[in-house]
Amino acid sequence: MSTKLDSFLLLRSLYQPIAVFEQLAKVDPSPASVIFRYSLWLMLLPPVFSLIGAANFGWRLGAAEPLQMTIDALLIVSVGYLIVLFFGLISTALISRWMASTYGASTSLGRHVALITIVGAPLAFASIAHLFPDVFVNTLVLIPTMIWSMYLLYKGIPIALETPPERGMLMASSLVGWLLVAAVSLLGISMGLWTLGFGPPLGV
C-alpha cells in the first residue's frame, strides 16, 4: 500500500472531497509526514491571521471600543492558540483511532490524522476572517464553514476509513460529541485560568 498523498490534497479537498477521501483510503501515510507536510501549515493560519488582525484593529466583541492588547500579549495568545490547535488535532486523531475498532474502521493513525486535517481545512482557510477580528463578521464566516467541515466528517469517515455508511455516521456523531465537550471545556479552563491571573493583561 502506498504511503504518499497528493501534494495538493488540502486544496482539492475543498472542491473534490470525495476523490480526496477515495485517495486517502488507498494509502497508509505516516502521522509525522501528514503533520509536517499538511497539518502544521494549516494550524499556523488562524494564529497568524488573528495576530495580524488584533494588532491592527483590536478585538471587537460588541463593546463600543475594541479590546486592545500589546504585541507581547498577542504573541502569547497566538502561541497558545497554536498549541490548542495542535493538541486538538492529535487528541481527536487518537480518539478517532480508538473508536475505529468499535465501528469496524481502519486503525491507521496516519489516515486518522489526515482525515482530521482535511475536515479542519475549511475552518483553517476561513480563519482569514480573523484579519478583521469582529465577532459578528467571524460568526458569519465560521458558522457556515463549520457546517461544511461537519459534512466532510460525515462523508469522509465511511470512505477514508473503509467502514459501512451507517457505522461511519455513528462514529462521526461520536467525534462531534467529543469536539463539543472539548470546546466547552477549553473555554471554561481558559476563562478560569485568565481570571486567576494566568494570562496576558487586558487593556481597553
Image (cartoon, rainbow, N blue to C red):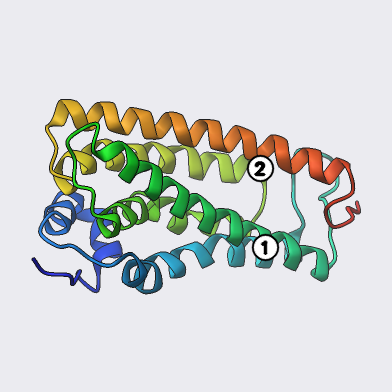
Is 87 left or right of 76, judged from the image as shown?
A: left
Image marks 2 and 1: residues in contact by CB distance under 8 Å? no
Identified by mark 2, the residue type is Val
Q: Which mark is residue 13?
A: none
Element marked by disc 1: helix
For the question of whether residue 53 can be seen, the reply is: no
- The residue indicated by pointer 2 is 135
- The residue indicated by pointer 1 is 78
Circle 1 Cα neighbour tier, 10 Å, few/some/many (<14 / 14–19 / ≥20): many
Q: Which residue occupies the foreground of this view, 167 or 68?
A: 167
Is 66 left or right of 92, judged from the image as shown?
A: right
Q: Which residue occupies the foreground of this view, 179 or 53?
A: 179
Q: Position of residue 148 (x, y in %)?
A: 34, 41
Is 32 left or right of 3, judged from the image as shown?
A: right
Q: Residue 5's image quarter? A: bottom left
Q: Residue 31's image quarter? A: bottom left
